[in-house]
């Protein structure tokens, strides 16, 4: 079971379309990559190549 991370100020912002976009701060707090190709992924995952950049 995954641990629930409380969302705090600075963890996300709303895009012009109204979607939540999680920041690098949130991803680092979560502690792992979800492999969804997130815009601010600090782990370097690329959904196009299905690999991690080093």
Image: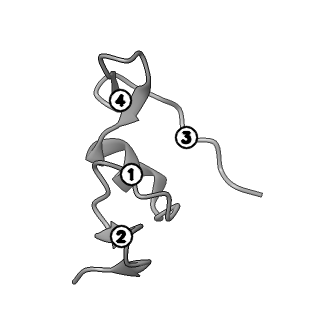
Question: Under tag 3, what secondary structure?
Answer: loop
Tell me the quarter of the picture where residue 18 sits. Answer: top left
**Numbered badge on residue 9:** none
Q: Is residue 41 above or below residue 39?
A: below
Front: mark 2 or 3: 2
Q: Residue at x 34, y 79 (%)?
A: 52
Left or right: 15 with respect to 32?
A: left
Front: mark 3 or 4: 4
Q: Position of residue 21 (x, y in %)?
A: 37, 33
**Numbered badge on residue 5:** 3
In the picture, which quadrant includes the N terminus?
bottom right
- The answer to whether marks 2 and 1 mark residues whose Cβ atoms lie closer than 8 Å is yes
Q: As rendered, which of 29 and 47 lies closer to the eye?
A: 47
Q: Residue at x 28, y 70 (%)?
A: 44
The coloring applied to the image is one colour
State how far apart marks 2 and 1 are (Cα): 8 Å
Q: Label 4, on which residue?
A: 12
Could you tell which of marks 4 and 1 lies nearer the N-terminus? 4
State how far apart marks 2 and 3 are (Cα): 21 Å
Q: Is residue 28 above or below residue 26?
A: below
State how far apart marks 4 and 1 are (Cα): 12 Å
State how far apart marks 3 and 4 are (Cα): 13 Å
Q: Residue at x 43, y 26 (%)?
A: 20
Q: Residue at x 37, y 18 (%)?
A: 17
Q: Label 2, on which residue?
A: 45
Instruction: Give neighbour class at mark 4: few <14, some 14-19, many 20+ (Cα, 10 Å).
Output: some
């Amino acid at each position: 079971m995954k641990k629930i991370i409380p969302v705090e100020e600075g963890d996300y912002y709303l895009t012009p379309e109204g979607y939540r976009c999680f920041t690098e701060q949130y991803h680092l707090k979560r502690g792992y990559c979800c492999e969804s190709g997130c815009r601010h992924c600090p782990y370097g995952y690329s959904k196009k190549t299905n690999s991690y950049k080093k």
